[in-house]
Image (spheres, rainbow, N blue to C red):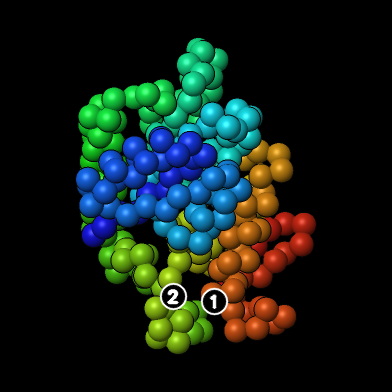
Amino acid sequence: MTNRFLILSQNPDLTTKIEQLIKKKRENYRHLTTPTSLVVALNDENYSGIFWDITQSNLDTTLATLLLIRNQVAGPIIIFTNSHSDRTLDKLYKAKVDFVAGLEINEKLLLRIFEQRLWSYSYKIHTQEKKLTNRADEEIIETGSIKINIGKYSVFKDNEPVVLTPKEFQLLAYLAQNKGNVISREQLLQKIWGYDLLGSSRIVDIHISHLRDKLENDSTHLEHILTKRGFGYCFI
């Protein structure tokens, strides 16, 4: 299966270097130029990693974006920057990036780092999926026309497959496994994204909206993913 990566850079030379590296691995890529477009792209499709040139970005904006998207990327995030101060490096690695490189990094070294990190994530995902499959292969949740197979990461509506992003599936599965219970935004943030920060609950609302678009028949008469105002969401 071919992987697809995001390149976020306004530097033509660096972009070309990264493109050549990805082509050597016979993988695919998409080129972006702003953090906002990065967030949009990850909400639309799944990607296996990010090459991110932050030389034209504000560090605080970069860190806020990383916090928002890190758990949507089941692969390496490699940062390119001119600043290698201890403060910058400390903040970037705390945001769970995989490697911080200079713009003039040797191509062979970059390729080796890329291959090693990609293998590491692939091995981790394979191991996790094997454990989940062994434990929950037959865990199927059905309600109305919706069928969710937890172990096989599949969702069907009216016997037709529904394409979800990894975060959308995790969110739906967690709600379905707690069917009938009201789950707060804070609980969902902690369980699915691994953090709970003031103002970050908006990401839950966005993903709930995407799930409703894909699963509900009528947005004005919700049947499955309900809002309990002041409390959270409930799957029925």
On screen, residue 82 versus residue 150, left or right, reads right
Residue at image position (60%, 72%) is: 212
Residue at image position (34%, 45%) is: 19
Residue at image position (72%, 57%) is: 231
Q: Is residue 7 above or below residue 173?
A: above
Q: In the displayed orientation, state which residue is furthest to the top.
A: 86
Residue 111 circle label? none
Which residue is under mark 1? 215
Q: Amino acid at mark 1?
A: Leu
Quarter the C terminus occupies: bottom right
Which residue is under mark 2? 162
Q: Amino acid at mark 2?
A: Val
Q: How many marks?
A: 2
Image x and y of residue 40, in percent: 56, 55
Quarter the N terminus occupies: bottom left
Q: Nearer the viewer, residue 223 or 163?
A: 163
Provide the secondary structure element on which disc 1 rests: helix
Q: Quadrant of residue 12?
A: top left
Residue 153 in sight from this viewpoint: yes
On screen, residue 67 versus residue 1, left or right, reads right
Q: Is residue 52 above or below residue 222?
A: above
Q: In the displayed orientation, state which residue is furthest to the front.
A: 13
Image x and y of residue 85, in percent: 51, 13
Image x and y of residue 84, in percent: 48, 16
Q: Dot 1, crowdedness within 10 Å: few (<14), some or many (≥20)?
A: many
Q: Are marks 2 and 1 in contact (CB under 8 Å)?
A: yes
Q: Earlier in the sequence, mark 2 or mark 1?
A: 2
